[in-house]
């Protein structure tokens, strides 16, 4: 069953719902958004009755906005309990303490950040909202001198982001300070089946322009990336699933792998894959299997077949975040035509209203694993050449 909500439902997801006839909860938003498609709707009350009964039904949301519906309609469900556990990064760190007993973290109200004594903290450390989304408000503090400037940036970002996402998705009243995790960063789409066993649907390498970069600009997947990381990621995810007793539950998980090969979690994003229908759509554009359908039907990728003919290709999701230094109101338009001239094989372009959502869109591209020039260009660009 799928519960959809704002801000975005991709055409691919809509077509999937029509083709597969996966049940969709008939909220007012879903009915309006899926108008014109032949959808297998169930009423909100039918969905509540089903999940309150003994039926074991997988539930997926395209957006964390839908978590509010789960809280209101299924407050005693395992979905609601796990959503709270993973959405709040402080609760999540408490959960995994047995796995990482020496990991430093501290919850702090936003109103107390100015008075926070950081004299005994080890550098660098990370500060971010305890309930966050899209790396908004995430900063690496390199030294004591940078702390005051970081606070200024956080306050400015809070003011800009006010009202963009509901509080259940982005809440800046509470922050978490935690030790910086060294190593390569990866994003994983996965689900836990009715028996609690994990299935990994994709592994993406999160690229950064520098050690201080915290943006969500480039995520890449390939045969080499998936195969070299699969075993340790499955082991790590299963440990998380066992701690939380996850069943019929999808997640988008962000981790880092240190020099010794140890997987350290950054966060678990509940009940969904990548936001804005990104990473789930990427598996289709790249590998031609449908992550939405695989979760709902309990299917597993046959990676040997998936990679046939794709051994030398890399597939990337490009997040066109506003890194121009300009306020949204200062930007008249974004030149998408000029942007796509920089990519030899654009698989899909998704345009977004930057005035409303503070990002310009998403691009899905294919490149050669031997040629990193396109990825390096977009990774280091602040996108000012594409705005007017």
Image (spheres, helix red, strand yellow):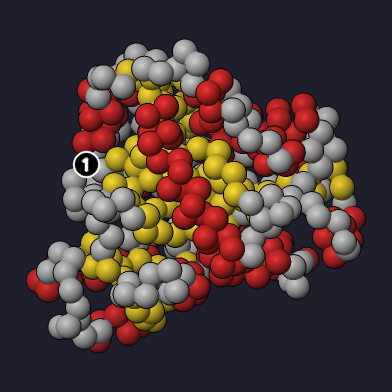
Please state the horizontal and vertical placement of residue 171, each as a whole percent of the image: 48, 68
Please say whether residue 172 is visible from this viewpoint: no
In this rendering, is residue 276 above or below 310? below
Q: Residue at x 26, y 19 (%)?
A: 370
- Dot 1 falls on a residue whose secondary structure is loop
Please say whether residue 247 is visible from this viewpoint: yes
Q: Residue at x 26, y 43 (%)?
A: 208
Quadrant showing the C terminus: top left
The residue singled out by tag 1 in the image is 209
> Who is closer to the viewer here, 233 or 176?
233
Q: Residue at x 49, y 58 (%)?
A: 268
Please state the horizontal and vertical placement of residue 195, each as a whole percent of the image: 71, 54
Q: Quadrant of residue 107?
A: bottom left
Q: Residues within 10 Å of mark 1 (few under 14, many from 20)?
A: some
| Number of numbered tags placed on the structure image | 1
Horizontal placement of 77 versus 151: left or right?
right
In this rendering, is residue 116 above or below 131? below
In this rendering, is residue 105 above or below 215? below
Q: Residue at x 26, y 63 (%)?
A: 180
Please state the horizontal and vertical placement of residue 348, each as a whole percent of the image: 49, 23
Horizontal placement of 269 versus 113: left or right?
right
């Amino acid at each position: 069953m799928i519960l959809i909500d704002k801000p975005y439902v991709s055409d691919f997801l809509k077509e999937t719902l029509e083709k597969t006839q996966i049940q969709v909860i008939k909220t007012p938003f879903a009915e309006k958004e899926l108008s014109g498609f032949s959808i297998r709707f169930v009423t909100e009350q039918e969905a509540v009755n089903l999940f309150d009964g003994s039926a074991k039904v997988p539930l997926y949301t395209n957006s964390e906005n839908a978590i509010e519906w789960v809280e209101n309609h299924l407050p005693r469900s395992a979905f609601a309990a796990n959503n709270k556990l993973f959405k709040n990064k402080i609760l999540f760190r408490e959960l995994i303490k047995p796995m990482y007993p020496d990991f430093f973290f501290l919850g702090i109200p936003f109103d107390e950040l100015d008075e926070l004594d950081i004299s005994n903290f080890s550098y660098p450390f990370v500060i971010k909202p305890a309930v966050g989304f899209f790396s908004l408000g995430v900063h690496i503090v390199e030294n004591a001198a940078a702390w005051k400037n970081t606070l200024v940036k956080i306050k400015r970002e809070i003011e800009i982001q006010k009202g963009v996402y509901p509080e259940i998705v982005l809440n800046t009243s509470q922050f978490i300070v935690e030790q910086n995790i060294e190593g390569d960063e990866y994003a994983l789409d996965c689900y836990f089946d009715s028996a609690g066993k994990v299935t990994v649907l994709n592994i993406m390498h999160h690229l950064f322009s520098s050690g201080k970069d915290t943006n969500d600009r480039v995520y890449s997947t390939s045969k080499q990336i998936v195969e070299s990381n699969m075993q340790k990621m499955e082991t790590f995810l299963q440990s998380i699933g066992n701690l939380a007793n996850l069943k019929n539950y999808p997640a988008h998980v962000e981790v880092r792998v240190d020099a010794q090969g140890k997987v350290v979690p950054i966060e678990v994003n509940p009940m969904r894959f990548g936001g804005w229908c990104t990473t789930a759509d990427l598996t289709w554009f790249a590998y031609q299997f449908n992550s939405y359908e695989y979760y709902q039907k309990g299917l597993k990728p046959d990676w040997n077949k998936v990679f046939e003919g794709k051994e030398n290709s890399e597939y990337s999701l490009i997040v066109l975040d506003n890194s121009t230094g300009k306020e949204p109101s200062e930007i008249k338009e974004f030149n998408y035509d000029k942007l796509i001239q920089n990519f030899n094989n654009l698989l899909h372009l998704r345009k977004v209203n930057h005035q409303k959502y503070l990002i310009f869109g998403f691009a899905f591209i294919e490149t050669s694993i031997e040629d990193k020039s396109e990825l390096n260009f977009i990774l280091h660009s602040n996108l000012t050449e594409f705005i007017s």
